[in-house]
Image (cartoon, grey):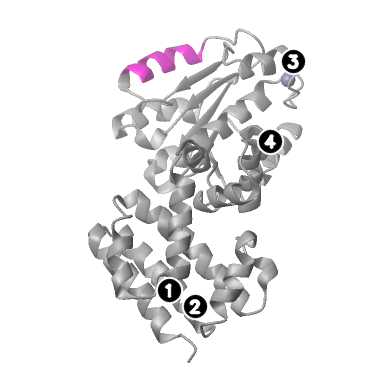
């Protein structure tokens, strides 16, 4: 299963389909997602739609075929690997006037425009504002506020929604993972297929997930804190653990409040039922607050060990405080 399958099901993609159908295609779009790989894939799928001979991304015409093969002469990609440089701009601007080679349009994908210098963004401004009639610009950026406002105002912004856990699970299963493991990766991806891809390639992620899960279920004394503290060696690991804990705490709360059908970790239902039987329901509301506070602390760059200590102590504390007598 390809990313394209998910992209063409999004409302944002359908918006462009209808722009094309009503002859309202904008001269410039900016695809925005913190998942930079997804934003670039989205722009690539849009280029296929825009250049397709039937304008429907048929998948069989010469244009679709060449785009799939990565050899379309009228798709010019800049900034995918390294930020767009002044030399690239010097190449882009004079080439805009050149007529398309294959069809009626040319697409310029300017990836990660937020990573380009202000000088580069300013130099591109005029072209993005008024390109020749045969040119469509597709920019990508990780966040709207990281792009010069002058650039932003000249593009139609497409804010890409994260994918659902179910969609990501389907994707992971199509890559060969079993149900429960696919769910673990989907949960850790937070809606970002680029993240799911990198977790799929990370062979230690599943065992990390399981360790965090064990910690969530069994850690209830200060002596365990030292053992688990050694797990969290990098900021990325702590972020991943917090995402996993957030979903587990939410699942525990849903089980405690009698809505087990809504939980994400369906395979853990019996274990969750045993766990919540020992605690008062509020425990899981407080547990989610603990995770949220740790996420906030991490976001403002509190030292990693301070965040980890605070988190682990707080988990033990919540369990101690809300244990049923
Ligand atoms: Zn086609």
Q: Quadrant of residue 121 in the image?
A: top left
At numbered mark 4, what does the secondary structure look like: helix, strand or loop? helix
On the image, the x and y values in percent for residue 224 come to: 33, 68
Q: Residues within 10 Å of mark 2 (few under 14, many from 20)?
A: some
Which residue is disc 3 drawn over? Answer: 61
User: Any magenta on residue 88?
Assistant: yes
Can residue 161 be seen in this snapshot?
A: no
Say if mark 4 contacts mark 1, CB within 8 Å: no
The answer as to whether callout 3 falls within 8 Å of ligand 1 is yes
Which residue is disc 1 drawn over? Answer: 289
Say if mark 3 contacts mark 2, CB within 8 Å: no
Say if mark 1 contacts mark 2, CB within 8 Å: yes
At numbered mark 3, what does the secondary structure look like: helix, strand or loop? loop
**Which quadrant: the N terminus?**
top right
Taking depth in this image into account, of 121 and 58 the one nearest to the observer is 58
Which residue is disc 2 drawn over? Answer: 285
Q: Give the distance between the C-alpha atoms of the residues marked 3 and 4, in whole angstroms.
A: 18 Å
Horizontal relation, residue 197 to residue 228: left or right: right
């Amino acid at each position: 299963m390809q990313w394209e399958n998910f992209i063409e099901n999004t409302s944002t993609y359908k918006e462009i389909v209808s722009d094309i159908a009503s002859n309202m295609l904008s001269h410039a779009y900016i695809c925005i997602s913190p998942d930079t790989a997804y934003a670039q894939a989205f722009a690539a799928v849009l280029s296929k739609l825009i250049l397709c001979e039937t304008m429907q991304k048929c998948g069989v015409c010469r244009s679709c075929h060449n785009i799939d093969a990565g050899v379309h002469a009228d798709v010019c990609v800049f900034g995918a690997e390294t930020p767009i440089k002044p030399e690239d701009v010097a190449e882009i601007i004079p080439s805009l006037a050149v007529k398309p080679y294959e069809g009626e349009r040319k697409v310029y994908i300017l990836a990660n425009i937020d990573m380009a210098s202000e000088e580069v963004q300013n130099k591109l401004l005029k072209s993005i504002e008024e390109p020749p009639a045969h040119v469509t610009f597709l920019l990508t950026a990780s966040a709207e506020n990281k792009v010069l406002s002058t650039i932003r105002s000249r593009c139609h912004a497409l804010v890409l929604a994260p994918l659902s856990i179910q969609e990501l699970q389907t994707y992971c299963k199509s890559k060969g993972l079993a149900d429960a493991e696919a769910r673990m990766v989907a949960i850790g991806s937070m809606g970002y297929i680029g993240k799911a891809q990198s977790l799929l390639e990370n062979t230690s992620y599943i065992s990390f997930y399981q360790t965090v899960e064990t910690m969530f279920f069994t850690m209830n004394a200060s002596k365990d804190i030292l053992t688990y503290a050694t797990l969290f060696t990098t900021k990325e690991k702590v972020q991943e653990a917090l995402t996993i804990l957030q979903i587990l705490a939410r699942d525990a709360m849903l089980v405690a409040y009698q809505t087990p059908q809504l939980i994400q970790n369906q395979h853990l239902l019996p274990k969750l039922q045993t766990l919540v039987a020992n605690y008062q329901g509020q425990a899981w509301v407080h547990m989610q607050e603990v995770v949220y506070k740790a996420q906030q602390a991490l976001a403002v760059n509190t030292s990693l060990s301070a965040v980890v200590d605070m988190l682990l102590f707080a988990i033990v504390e919540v369990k101690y405080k809300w244990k049923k007598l």
